[in-house]
Amino acid sequence: NSLSALQAVSICAGFPYTFAVCFMCTSMYRALLIDSKDPTIMDKFKFATSLLDFCEAFAPPSAPFCAPLVLTQVRSLAVAIFAPGLAVRKIADDIYQDSCTSTLHAVGSSVLFYSWFLLMCMDTPSNTKNVGYYYALGWSAFMIFVCWVTFLRSQMRIKYNVYGSEVEDLFCALFAYPLTLSQLELQTGV
């Protein structure tokens, strides 16, 4: 019994490293493509900001000369955290150039985001009748929201000729949706 518990703990402890290894493999592949001057990556552009610019106080040494101001980046990140629909509207307006379509994107993504939050709050221990159902609905709403952000990021990559893949877009949206939305919103000003 104790051996199976030890095995379970070791599997749980190693599981996050699986994702880290996957990210390192794709980073190594990209670095090798850049090092070999492969045209599939050398002919492409990068986003104006990086997802992890906040780690360097929004002023990384490798930032392009046209990088947004620090206060602009902080405001964009705050909007993406608390009101992602506003960021989605600006992104969709840049992609589609149509206010009706961008408004539908903003409303739809806002409904999904706030549904996720509210449904997670509704599933309390005092609500014993429907325990677990609200969680399932909430996480379903969040995953649809993540797919929506993934779609917008892939459309922005196509529009601005940025190197990447849909899998990369999915992981960015899944693990760091506010950073992804902020990155895309700041790209619209470029």
Image: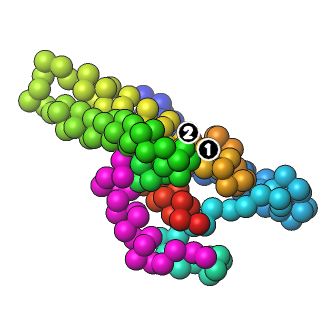
Where the N terminus falls, by quadrant?
top left
Residue at (61% x, 44% y) in the render = 155
Residue at (8% x, 30% y) in the render = 126
Please tell me how crowded label 1 is: few (under 14), some (14-19), or many (20+) other residues with Cα within 10 Å: some
Residue at (41% x, 54% y) in the render = 87
Quadrant of the rendered image containing residue 127:
top left
Residue occupied by mark 2: 151
Residue at (89% x, 57% y) in the render = 38
Please give left or right for residue 142 compared with residue 54 in the image. left
Residue occupied by mark 1: 154
Where the C terminus falls, by quadrant?
bottom right
Circles 2 and 1, Cβ within 8 Å, touching? The answer is yes
Q: What kind of element bears circle 1?
A: helix
Q: Position of residue 13 (x, y in %)?
A: 50, 46
Residue 143 is covered by the magenta coloring: no
| Observer-nearest of 39 and 21 | 39
Name the disc covering residue 128, or none: none
Q: Position of residue 167 (x, y in %)?
A: 64, 40
Please give left or right for residue 119 compared with residue 21 in the image. left
Q: Which residues are magenta?
A: 66-86
